[in-house]
Image: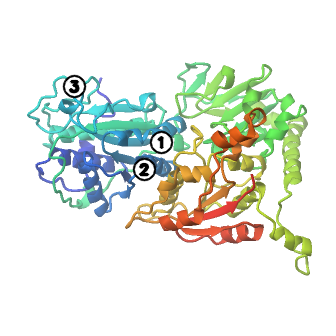
Amino acid sequence: MPDPILTDTAAVGEGLPFTSPAATGSPATDFSVALLGAFVSLGIRDIVVSPGSRSQALALVAAELERLGLVRLHVRIDERGAGFLALGLAVETGVPALVICTSGTAVANLHPAVLEAHHSGVPLIVLTADRPVELRGIRSNQTTVQTGLFGVATRLCLDVPAPGAAAIAAAGAPAGHAGDATESRADGAGRSSDAVRAAELAARSMDAATGGRSLDPGPVQLNLAFREPLSAPVTLERSAGPAATTTEPPLSHGQTDGSPAFAVSGDVVTGDQAALVVDGGLRTVVVAGTGAGSAAEEFARAGGWPLLAEVSSNARFGPNLVAAYRELLQAEDFGGRVERVIVFGHPSLSREVPALIQRDDVETIVVAPTGAEWYNPGHRVRTFARTARVGASASSEAETRDGRAWLGSWVMSSRRVLDAATEDADVPFGAHGMTRAEFAALRAPVTRSMLVDAVWRASWPHDRLVLGASRLIREADRRVPGKKISVHSNRGLAGIDGTISTATGIALASQAFQHGSEPRSTGTTRLLLGDLALLHDAGSMLLVPGEARARLQVIVGNDGGGTIFDGLEVAASAPDDLISRVLYTPQGVDLSALAAAYGWEYDRAATRSELERALTAPPLGPSLLEVPLTR
């Protein structure tokens, strides 16, 4: 049976948004024109390039596509930052971005972003340039085994032979090549075999990256071999008429509400495509982790169940919200009475949630529209579903006295816990101005709780909020109230890699005009992170001449090192000097000098009043706001 993904590649090739140029004399350039043109026809809008010799044909064609206004081109000298920039672009749009890099260690530097995309289900397509088969395995310069370098993290990995009617046969090429360099094919439109192959590769890559059939979106690697001449001059002309219109991009299933439904029971797919019906009869809570989205809130509301939503879930709003879920899960009158947990997204910010799921007396249902790996703490979960809906008995039960009491006790107790914790609440103003105590409060040093509260208050639906992996995201998860805003955090592997790059990608994608329509975000993208996460990705602050500069405010809570370890068990067992040496890793970087070196605006907020001022009126371009914190 023919592959359905490949049956319409003629339409892809014939619908290129530019007129097909004559052969340039460089098969590398001709193939790059066909491949990138096919990707644009399929909806790719963002291409991230890291410079290099072996990938020069791809890079130069990408620049031509930018000149025609067909793509947004982003150039980054560091492949690690380039990968996370592409990840941020895809997080915001739901459409994969292309990442182009040269051979050798350049490919390895993409690995952290590929892993995060793999574990987060974010679509990403990396085009890694390589030497042809005859130059491999003989210690050629800048040559290693690139195919399969990312292991199981890719949804599709193809080693693509060098294009062109090669005089050197590809005999002895490793298994897994996506076709032979000497094969000769043409279609009804008279396209070369390389153009046909390029269209097929683009179609397969988009399907695999977006989870079109697999329901498992994630990264794809096309390892592209090129022979010399590595490039030739090419000038593209935009097509007139229907051919200039590209298709709507295929959104990742992980980014849409219309994901296909495949019910799953235990480890076996039932195949009936019907949503799992969740009936009443059990005291139930709904847990929303990263990526849960509004579906979790709607489900909890329909069932009349408490919603335990993490701060990065994009479900932390609504009348059923229980923000202080950690404290209540520890209480016998609340967590001790739970009989069933329904999980959306990927919970990763507390120990209480996995502990609840691993109890023998608790039934758990995990709902995930996409992904091959299920959330399953302690291997205790027995029911999995692609989609779920609230049954009639549960809806009726929610209206009973017991149902309302169950929900109401959680919601009201959570509010009381938060109220008791708001020692850093807004400073009230009396009818005759501020009192001496109120004035002193405005001049008080900023605390972590004060910082997360202020950033949360300053963020609105027209903004974007990105939270780094540090103490601050956990502080926010403990205390901020409900608000329907767009929040992202790289929680697939919860690393500090590429945090600035990811936020930059989100900012650029959300603030860009979309085919003549208004941008998704007319506000500011705020990134809240710790000082070590900032320094780990400081190279991503480099501004590229000629590229758009996002409204990005990086807010760094600077406590001089990795204080997150102060709250872990090791703090009570290891000597302080050793903790400081190898875990806390103290730093004294002058962040104002760092900002100046990269051309960013800089501000410092040491008091509440300074913090409120800086958050209320952020600069229009990239800026760094340093907030000193005590250890």
Q: Position of residue 369 (x, y in %)?
A: 56, 34
Q: Image point 91% across, 75% down: which residue?
A: 435
| Amino acid on which the number 1 mark rests in the picture | Ala
* Quadrant of res 179: top left
Q: Earlier in the sequence, mark 2 or mark 3?
A: 2
**Local SS, label 1:** helix
Instruction: Say which of 221 and 514 sits in front.
Output: 221
Task: Give residue 113's mark.
Answer: 1
Does the image show residue 444?
yes
Residue indicated by mark 2 = 82
Q: Position of residue 99 (x, y in %)?
A: 37, 47
| Amino acid on which the number 3 mark rests in the picture | Ala
* Location of the N terminus (image quadrant): top left
Q: How far apart are the two marked residues, 2 and 3, measured between alpha carbons?
A: 30 Å
Mark 1–mark 2 CB contact (< 8 Å): yes
Instruction: Say which of 86 and 496 sits in front.
Output: 496
Residue indicated by mark 3 = 173
Q: Earlier in the sequence, mark 1 or mark 2?
A: 2
Instruction: Say which of 440 and 265 sits in front.
Output: 440
